[in-house]
Image (cartoon, rainbow, N blue to C red):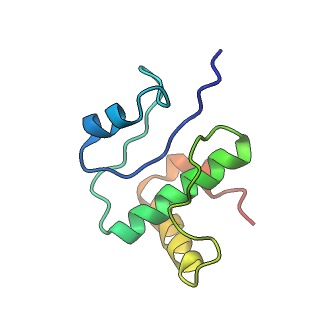
Amino acid sequence: MTDLKQYVGLTIAYARRIGQHAGRVLNGSELEILKHIPSKNLARGIEQLFIEYGRKVGEISNKINSINPKGEKYQTLINNAIDYMKKNHSDLDFLWKDRK
């Protein structure tokens, strides 16, 4: 067992990003890579879904949100992310199925 928690982030250079987070990301840990997200705002919404889920279950090390939960665009970006994930990655339904 380890105390290291997951990290969620956006990148166009995966190998470099892993190097930047050495010690926070486990080698050989389970990895979910979503590629070719149509827009940066959509990617940020998806990232926020992972962050919020990880915080709920106590398995995330991110300290900063991808989207400000108090921002005026928050709910639209989250809704767009959920719609996209339902259509393209329905196997990750744990991200949205218990949201209020």
Residue 66 % position (x, y)? 50, 62
Quadrant for residue 31, please give it.
top left
Q: Position of residue 51 (x, y in %)?
A: 58, 52
Residue sitting at 48 percent across and 46 percent down?
A: 8
| Residue 79, quarter of the rendered image | bottom right
Q: Is residue 92 left or right of residue 100?
A: left
Quarter occupied by the C terminus? bottom right
Position of 21 relative to 36 (above/below):
above
Tally of numbered tags: 0
Q: Can you give x and y, in whole percent of width and height, for residue 6 in the image?
A: 55, 36
Q: Residue at x 58, y 84 (%)?
A: 72
**Of residues 49 and 92, the one drawn nearer to the viewer in this rendering:** 49
The residue at the point 63 percent across, 18 percent down is 2
Relative placement, left or right, of 25 versus 74 is left
Judge whether 56 appears above or below 23 on screen. below
Residue at point 40% right, 62% down? 43
Quarter of the image holding residue 99? bottom right
Residue 87 at x, y percent in the picture: 44, 62
In which quadrant will I find the N terminus? top right
Q: Is residue 73 above or below residue 42?
A: below
| Left or right of 23 on screen, residue 61 | right
Q: Residue furthest top?
A: 1
The answer to which of 24 and 30 lies nearer the viewer is 24
| Residue sitting farthest toward the right | 100
